[in-house]
Each structure stands twice: as structure tokens, then as C-alpha cells.
Amino acid sequence: MDDVHRSLMTMPVVTMIGGGQLARMTHQSAIALGQCLRVLAASETDPAAQVSADTVIGSHDSLEDLRRAAQGANVVTFDHEGVPLEHLEALEADGVAVRPPSEALRFAQDKLAMRTRLRGLGLPVPDFADLSGDRVAAREALLGFGGRHGWNIVLKAVRGGYDGRGVWLLDDEAAALAVFDGIDDETVLMAEAKVAMRRELSALIARSPFGQGAAWPVVETIQRHGQCAVVLAPAPGLAPAVAERAQQMALRLADELGVVGVMAMELFETVDGALVVNELAMRPHNSGHWTMDGAVTSQFEQHLRAVLDYPLGATDPVAGPVVMANVLGAPQPPQMSMDERVHHLMARMPEAKIHLYGKGERPDRKIGHVNIVGAPDSSLEEVRERAERAATWLSTAIWNDGWEAHGE
Ligand SMILES: Nc1ncnc2c1ncn2[C@@H]1O[C@H](COP(=O)(O)OP(=O)(O)O)[C@@H](O)[C@H]1O
Ligand SMILES: [Mg+2]
């Protein structure tokens, strides 16, 4: 064996299930830390498979493929919630270090189990109803629940939803029943009271098996078409006591559930200033992309540190306010190539930090994001304007302020 291989053998191999953008960005941190990130990807063109030299092509639904990907790795972790629970348990029975463990991850996979558990732990959650099981009884339950809440309700697929898919915000009985009656047989639904909110927040934390916890500043998330579009870090005007309460809730919950890795707790700030927990993600999260350029330790590095039980990194912001804006596929992809759009953006906004995921442009699909890190004295509004301008430009090849480069 040559000395390169001898030295590499002492460094960890982390298997990430799923080859999406989260795995792609985790790979960047793995490179810096001298680790190997192996990905189980559905295809060679998946965002992470394009960049990882150690890609296993297969399906997260196949135990055989999962075992192949786990072979020889120090730990197995995830870029999505889709792995069947029984497969996770089988891997654990094989002796694989699954992080976060199935015990914890099941609550991120199942919105009904999560709501039930959170309520059991005394955390603030919206009123909800279980619509699983017998359809006739569930329809009755929906009629009762909807009536009690003036049909200001939300229907959610218990499993498999993301980016607003599998979530229906409703305000009348007919629309709710249309969703319920139109759903396919495989989808299990639950109902929730619609929260009258001021805004949405996210408390991003990490926890290691040793039990160390770390929390980044609480951020505000702005959704469009049911998915996260913009993140303001830190959440502007959030009372320090409320921010600390959110961080404490997330850290305590992670401890209680035995979460390992990064966890995002999505929260609603109600119109009267109270916090209500929406959902949990036990992996790097869209609300933490700002940390790549705006915090001492990015969420991707931290996830690796946590799942490998290294000491966690500092979570302090590096400068002033940071705004992350997602680059979404335009309704009609622009004529101008992405590469040319990147050139123009770099020319006009040299401070913009561009992150592209290697994905095809489809309407509303997340294909990248831009971070703008403000100076300590910048106003959040001004930073946000620049971040949104940059992301809109990359999406559409249109400057949202009508600017045109002259002399071309
Ligand atoms: N109970 C609720 N009340 C009001 N808005 C909600 C509620 N639940 C979800 N939403 C809205 O729908 C979005 C997506 O719901 P969420 O459960 O987070 O699903 P996803 O898995 O798609 O992120 C939330 O970010 C929020 O804007
Ligand atoms: Mg969500």
C-alpha cells in the first residue's frame, strides 16, 4: 500500500443517502476536512453524484443498495427523509452507525408521529387531527375538526411531502373535502389548525452523540408557493428572549429524541408573538444555507462533525446581516445561458456568493442560491434587496430594478 492510501485510510468515510444538493454541499465540507463523502444516488446526474468520486448508484428504497452504500463507512446519514424505517432498523441491526438514528428520524419522516410526540413533550403545536385509518371515520373526523376551526385548516400528507408538496392551505369545507376525497389510496392525511402568524422562523442546531449541542442564530424564512425562497439571518427584530427560547426548545428536543447531526425546527411566530412548532428536519436545511458564507461553521461542516462525534464548530456570524435567496427555475427558462448569467452577476455584484446545484431548470425548482453577507453596519433591507436581485437575475436573466449594462 502506498503512503497516500495508508494516510487516507485513517480518515473517515461518511455515506450520505440521497444525491441531492444537500449531499453536494456536504461534499464540499468533506473535502475540506479530508474526509470522503460517499453518496447513494439514483443517477449519475444527481447533484452530488456529479461531484463525488465515491458514488453508489441505487435506490434508498432497496435494503440491498443501502447495505452496499454502508459497506465500510464509518457512519450513514441522509440528505432526505425518504428511507423506509424498517430499512434503517435493519442497518442498525447490522451494526451500522445510522445518524440520526431511526428512533429519532422517524419523527422527521412522519408529520403525525411528530405532532403527537411534540405535544406529548409539552411543546406548542397547532391543534391537529389524525385522519389515518378507515376513510369513512376519517371523513367524519375531518368534518368535526373543520367545523371546530371554521374550516381554517391545513391538510397535510403525513409522509413524503416537501417544498409545499403535500400541504393544502384551506378556508372552506368544499375545498377541504375535495382534497380529502381526491387523494390516492396510498396517501395518509392529517389536518391542522391554520396558525395566524406574523412570520416563519427556523431554529437550526446541531447535536453530537457525545451530547454536545450548538445553535446558530434564529432566522426568518420567507416562503413562496409553499417553499422557502428567502432567509434573513438573524431574524430581524426578534426579541432576544424569544430567540433564546426557540434555540432552547430545539436543543432540548434534539436531546430528548436523541437526534444526531443538524436539525432544523421550523416555527411560526403567531400574531400575538408566541412560538408554535411547525416541523422538524434532521439534516442540513434550506434555512441554514446562509451559514456557508455567513457563519464561522457552515451547517454542512457541522453535520459532518456531529455525525462523526467530533467537537462542534463555532456558530457565530462572521459579519453583519446575511440574506440567502434561492434561485428558482423560471416559468420559462431564459434564452441566456446560466453561464452567461453568472458572468453578468459577477460583473455587477462582485460580493454575491453563488451556489449552483447542477440541476436542470424547471419552473419553481430550487436550482441554487445566492448569499449576500452584509457589512456589520449594513441594513438588512439593503442586503435583502441585493440578494433577491441576484437570485432573480440568475433565475430569469432580468434585473428586477430595470438596470441594463451599457456599452455592450
Ligand atoms: N398549521 C399551519 N398554519 C399555517 N400555515 C402552515 C401550517 N402548516 C404549514 N403551513 C405553511 O405551509 C408551508 C409548508 O408546510 P410544511 O408542513 O412545512 O411542509 P413542507 O414539508 O412542504 O415544508 C409552511 O412553511 C407554512 O408556510
Ligand atoms: Mg416545512
Image (cartoon, helix red, strand yellow):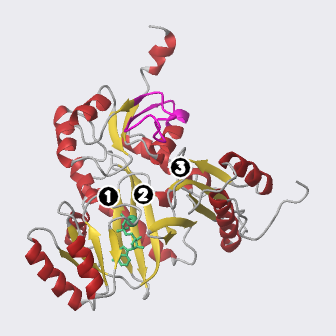
Q: Quadrant of residue 181?
A: bottom left
Residue 241, numbered circle: none
Q: Is residue 326 left or right of residue 347?
A: left
- Distance in Å between CA atoms under marks 1 and 3: 19 Å
Say whether residue 289 is left or right of residue 279: right
Instruction: Identify the element where label 2 is drawn.
Output: strand
Residue beneath disc 2: 205
User: Which of marks 3 and 1 precedes in the sequence?
Assistant: 1
Task: Work out whether 235 lies above or below 177.
Answer: above
Q: Residue furthest right?
A: 407
Residue 12 image position (x, y, % from top left): 41, 29
Q: Position of residue 323 (x, y in %)?
A: 61, 64
The correct choice, above or below, for 127 with respect to 300 in the image is below
Element assignment for label 3: loop
The amino acid on which the numbered mark 3 sits, given as a three-letter code, is Ser
Q: Main secondary structure of the magenta part?
A: loop
Of mark 3 and mark 2, the one earlier in the sequence is 2
Q: What segment is highlighted magenta in the picture?
A: 30-55
Q: Image quadrant for the C terminus?
A: bottom right
Residue topped by disc 1: 254
Q: Which residue is mark 3?
A: 298
